[in-house]
Image (cartoon, rainbow, N blue to C red):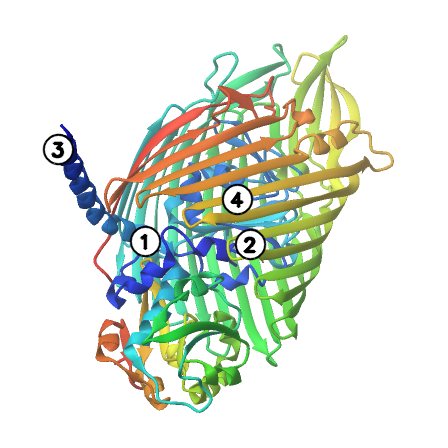
Amino acid sequence: MTFRVRRHLRAAAAAVVALISVCPAGAQSAPRSEYEIKAAYLFTFARFVDWPPRAARDDSSFAICVLGTDPFGATLDATIAGAAIRGRKVSVRRISSPEAAGACHIVFVSASEDHRMATLGPALAQSGALTVSDMPQFADRGGMIQFVTAANRVRFEINLQSARQAGLMMSSELLRVASAVRTGGGPV
Amino acid sequence: MLVWPQTAHSQQQTAPSRLTELSLEQLGDIEVTSVSKRPEEVWRTGVAVHVITHDDIRRSGATSIPEVLRLAPGIEVARIDSDHWSIGVRGFGDQFSKALLVLIDGRSIYTPLFAGMYWPAHDVLLDDVERIEVIRGPGGTIWGADAVSGVINIITRTAAETHGVMASVGSGNIDRGAGALRIGGGNGSTFDYRVYGKGVNRGAEHHADGATFDEWWTSQAGFRADWTRTAGDTITLQGDVSKGSHGQRASVASFSPPSQQPLDGNLDALGMNVRAQWQRDFSSGRGFRVQTYVDRTVWDAPHFGERRTTADIDFVHHATIARRHTLTAGGGARVSPSAFSQAISTLDFTPRRETSSVYSAFVEDEVALIPDRLWMTAGSKLEHNSYTGFETEPGVRLLWMPRPTSSVWTAVTRAVRTPSRIENAVVSTAYSSTTTVPIFLRITGNPDFDAERTTGYEAGYRTALGAAAYLDVAAFHNRHDGLASFGLGRVALESTPSPLHAVVDVLYVNGVNGTSDGFELSPGWQPLTWWRLRGSYSYVRFNLANTPGSIDVNAVARYTGSSPHHQVRLESHLNLAATGEFDATYRYVSALPAQKVTAYHTADARVGWALSRRSEVSLVGQNLLAPYHAEFGHNLGQPIGIARSVYLEIRWRLLNARP
């Protein structure tokens, strides 16, 4: 009797496991907020980029900075909470000037800075940080990675020349997944 | 402008940290709720604005734009019958939603015939809507005349966001049948398009006498194409055609008995519009947008007909000057020729043919007084309209953001509502009483009727409360001059048409002045990643009086008693596992004495679940707390009961492979 109940339980458990293993596909198809995805990208990019050592930066931890009006709210902090990149603790900082970017590994440039990109570009290039933004034409204006949203999916474009000038090495995996890679002024 | 509750909104569904375990390709394949291109803007806006997102619309279970607008605080949406609504912002609820400007992708659906919206004739596919910005308070400085109590900006998704095939069918006891099909494609970057078609058939609400005059149907089809030549250089072409038949009960007077009787029939509406827009943004922070559209409507009702063609062109240029100034300037022109056709002898317009026109120019400067902290915006619109000539609508706003997650703002703005055709040129006769001869009241358009002018004083505060909650508060004090009321004209005996009758002329006059005050409180809280709560409380009070010599004893009561003083709304949105959703809404609306409507509570609920990655089912119940309740008066007899309703919808999506 007990044995039989246990066998039923085991069958039920197997069915539940089977259901759960089917579920993640459905879970992923549920729409997510745009900035949740962008926050996850910022974290993931770190796996595919090598930074040269910098005097201004504390390389024992990993700093993701947001320059300008923060569009992430609490999402970015929640995404990286307790996370580590190559064994280094990750922190989020909000900065208001490009001079402060020297201490950052990744700088997300808010669309609020669009009007001063002409002056920001050179200052950010000096900082040696990976620059990422979703403002229009960011990659055309000296930025390294630009988010592009199409068909409700967030993809990204790369300006490889900007990254190289700053001494950053991008892995071929990152370049392969990018929807466009620019090596000079225009798209390849 | 964008979704201000970004913090609460952004941490949806499952733990966000799981996303960091995905590969780059997997991240690129996740569908996002594209809330906005520039989400920081609502924080950075010194305006009382509420943004209804695509997801909010879907989860509300609403089947029409007016029902969706209930989501915004400070808006009074009252359903009169199945196909009519009274919509007001901060008071001034009215069947024609006077003093409110409504735009669908920049195309105004305000009709100069009665200075308002005829909602059932201007539809969109709700699944195409990216967001609806509901702006409370005078918006004349940017938006121009008629944006007096508010602006409703309906913005559809770009064609790149609607790739693939979407099909839906639904049916219920009142929403008897609805279906939609949309097909979109393109390469996701330089050229994208969509075409759609939809049809709706809705039954009558609850009538004590069993009448069913408010049944209606409408069908609509349209397209949109977006062509991006280079980044920041986009041309959009879109258009719609619609045909519908909307049930009405009109009250019709005749000089021979019976002097006044109801007339049931359909308003047959035909609509066509096409819009082109060119938007160019330069890297220097400079950009422009030029838009033009043509909109044609043909209405045939049992008691009147109107044909109208509106052509509009609009230009806006913005530039950053000396780093701290963002200068926006623009101009526009609109011409709207129309022809009224008489169907009954007691309703006419003089003249029947008319062309109204508006020419406008505006300039506005946003100055960053302290970069990233304090901004001032000042500007004015100068407008010339064919009814009242030149009007100026200046405004000044101050915005302070002590932290990136909170803002304080204040504003003073002026707006005008220009007269409508009705106020200017109508001749409408209604039976009053019989003494020795029958007496008729003849409402007569008054060419001297001036614009209604409003000056608004506003302030607001928005703040995030921790990572999972926010609060938005806005308060206002509006000064109104020259609101419409009735004045007395001449009294005469007329023998044609026979029999002999007396006619008392009643004129539109600017006979009411005064103030309105109120506030809206809208908090939101996400206690768990899968549970979101939102609410709002809206309060408005009036202090209106007749101008000296004004004789309309009902006007003040009509204004103050047609909008609820108190409105409460509570929403709960639950995500159940990965595939289920449960949404519930409760609302309370206080009494409308002028409309013979008592205070009411009601509730809506929706259950949605994904059958597979490609299909979802939802079951929606509306007005669940009572078999029916009245929301607004009807021009004939008792208010109509808005019935409890239930409907089921199935939706399929087939998405193309990645663009």
Q: Are marks 4 and 1 on the same chain?
A: yes
- Quarter of the image for residue B33 reads bottom left
What is the chain letter for disc 4?
Answer: B
Q: Name the residue tied to disc 1.
A: B162
**Disc 4 designates what residue?**
B534
| B272 shown above or below B433 | below
Query: Residue drawn 65% across and 69% down?
Result: B375
Pick whichever of labels 2 and 4 is earlier in the sequence.
Answer: 2
Residue A129 location, x and y as percent?
A: 41, 83
**Camera-nearest label, 1 or 3:** 3
User: Which residue does the numbered mark 2 point to in the structure image?
Assistant: B334
Residue in the foreground of this view, choosing between B347 and B556: B556
Residue drawn at (32%, 88%), measured in percent from left and top? Answer: A164
> Which residue is tagged 3?
A3
Residue B111 shows in this picture: no
- Image x and y of residue B12, in percent: 41, 52
- Count residues near mark 4 (Cα–Cα under 10 Å), then give few for <14, some for 14-19, many for 20+: some
Chain under numbered label 1? B
B182 is higher (above) or lower (below) than A113: above
Q: Earlier in the sequence, mark 1 or mark 2?
A: 1
For label 3, the SS is helix
